[in-house]
Amino acid sequence: MRKQIAAANWKMNLTIGQAEKLIDDIFKIPVSVKHGQEVVFGVPFPYLTTIKNKLVGKEHFLVAAQNCSDKKSGAYTGETSVEMLHSIGTDYIIIGHSERREYFNETNAQLAEKVLLAFTYKLKPIFCCGEALAIREAGTQNAFVETQLKESLFNLSAEQITNFVIAYEPIWAIGTGKTASSAQAQEMHAHIRRVLASHYGNDVANTVSILYGGSVKAANAKEIFGQPDVDGGLVGGASLIAEEFAAIINSLK
Ligand code: PGA
């Protein structure tokens, strides 16, 4: 059974006080996280330790960094290494979010380096992929996403890709209020799984959790997560509202 995951992506939002209050507010609402499910908070670097400490004793609640350097260590002012993230107990790293690709020009080759570094320090990547509107309109989204996966992930071993986490986030649905239909999400998630199976075999591909991201909210989570190849979500805007995110957690399969 693949892990079902509700992952929050806070992006560059919230002060530390607001962040702690958000966590407290979520726990005031009855959230049920069963065996085989995980809740991951993707928080800004300076908050990782504080939020991790707030989750002590809460089984299945974990923290993610939103990025990492593609270099191991050294003279890279302002960067944060995977080793640093490991040393403070970070569980996951969101790698290759479309905002990083678009605003910081991150390439598939650089993202491949980040994924390898994550494995070196035993952090779990949440690898993001997804197409822009023009690509969707041209009908070439399957080939586009396939190239993203091949160029960043196909140098991994079958062992590394087992239990891997991918987030499919169509750029045209991020922060726009426009969600892919559950049928569009299922179609792309099945395609991603086929691409993985072509290289690693069905058994390995079936262990990979594929999250959907792009305007997930309480009102649509259950239907999207109910698709056979959708294993949860990576949630931006709605993860900043306690009631919304709690309902999204409770919508996991
Ligand atoms: P959104 O963002 O839920 O606000 O669309 C999702 C994401 O960018 O991860």
Image (cartoon, rainbow, N blue to C red):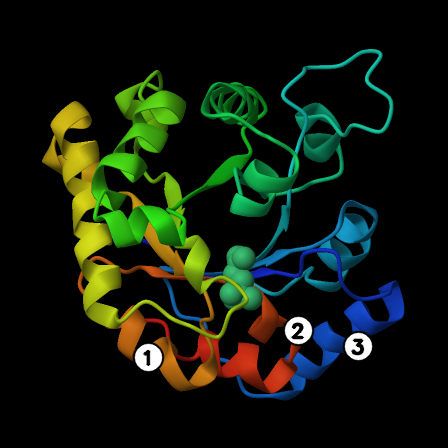
Across and down, in percent, residue 128 comes to 45, 43
Look at label 2 and name its amino acid: Leu
Callout 1: 10 Å neighbours few (<14), some, many (20+)? many
Quadrant in the rendering for residue 164: top left
Alpha carbon distance from label 1 to label 3: 26 Å
Q: List the residue tagged with mark 2.
A: 240
Quadrant in the rendering for residue 87: top right
Across and down, in percent, residue 110 comes to 54, 21
Closer-to-camera residue (150/249)? 150
Q: Is residue 252 left or right of residue 215?
A: left
In the rendered image of this protein, does residue 90 appear above or below residue 34?
above
Q: Is residue 226 left or right of residue 62?
A: left
Marking on residue 222: 1
Q: List the residue tagged with mark 3.
A: 21
- What number of labels is visible? 3
Closer to the camera: disc 3 or disc 2? 2
